[in-house]
Amino acid sequence: MLISNLEIVPGMRVRRHLGLIQGSTVRAKHVGKDFMAGLKNIFGGELTGYTELMNESREAAMARLQEQATALGANAILNVRFATSTIAVGASEILVYGTAVELERMGV
Amino acid sequence: MMLPYELIILLSLLLLGYVFGRLAERRHYRSIQAREDQYRQLLVLAERHLPPEYVTSHESRLVMGNVVVSVDYFKMMIATLRNLVGGSIGAFESLLDRARREAILRMQEQAAALGTGVVIFNVKLETCRVSGDASRGVGSVEVMAYGTALYPRGNASR
């Protein structure tokens, strides 16, 4: 699956547009990590646990995005955007959306 | 005279925040500058349109980098005081500046793995508050940078 946040893919041409697709996850951190973060709020610095957590959630959201694209018969997702929001204390939603398309190689 | 117990805690938290926060910030800036020098050749552009020669000779791939940074107690206190009189909060500005540059660097790191001659197009930055306790204001903030890396077709794919 080709994922890009541009509208075109070099060397390829869009044969079919299959519409908007999205994938999202809502994740909460566990208490241990929250406790460590509380400590870090005193000393400052990077919260490695959270960085990893956000990364993992983003991968999960992208996996869902790709599932949808596959189900539609797409072979690429273009113009992908990410959005993150804090929906409750200690939980955030990660949303990925883009356009599912079917690409074909241009005769170069 | 005995100081009240709470005041001692507050002062020691402030001191800890000031000393460690300052050290961490200085160390982080040093590392950011060193890595920015290292990746100077790897262009990061906000441009959405590809130059025509790229269309026939390059392949594309999504790259991203993210970081969650936390404020320290001292900065939080400065910000609270600043809120009373208004104005710019330098303590938070440097925090966000660091986070943004770090996220871009991590994205560049990912792109650098694609080989030489990589250019990242259409870079977007996204900022979001990630805090355990929403009532306490900014606890920590996540910055994410993403874009599409264009690499010469000859480079190893994937």
Image (cartoon, rainbow, N blue to C red):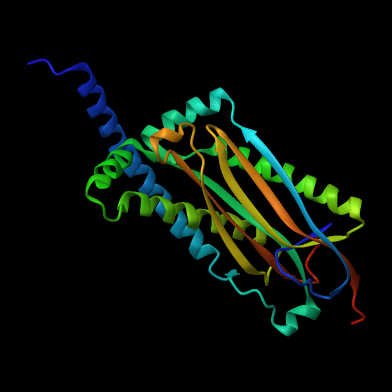
- Relative to the observer, which residue lies in front, A52 or B81? B81
- Relative to the observer, which residue lies in front, B30 or B136? B136
Q: Is residue A75 left or right of residue B4?
A: right
- Relative to the observer, which residue lies in front, A106 or B25? A106
Q: Which part of the image, by quadrant, shows the N terminus of chain B?
A: top left
Which residue shows up at 46% across the image and 59% down it? B34
- Residue B14: x %, y % from top left: 27, 33
Which residue shows up at 25% across the image and 27% down it? B10
- Residue B44: x %, y % from top left: 58, 69
- Quick one: which residue is furthest to the bottom in this view? B52
Number of marks in the image? 0
Q: Which part of the image, by quadrant, shows the C terminus of chain B?
A: bottom right
Quarter of the view holding residue B147: bottom right
Q: Is residue B47 left or right of residue A22?
A: left
Q: Is residue B94 above or below residue B75?
A: below
Q: Is residue A14 above or below residue A89?
A: below
Q: Is residue B112 left or right of residue B34?
A: right
Quarter of the view holding residue A17: bottom right
Q: Is residue B148 above or below residue A41?
A: below
Which residue shows up at 55% across the image and 23% down it? A31
- Residue A24: x %, y % from top left: 71, 44
- Residue A97: x %, y % from top left: 72, 55
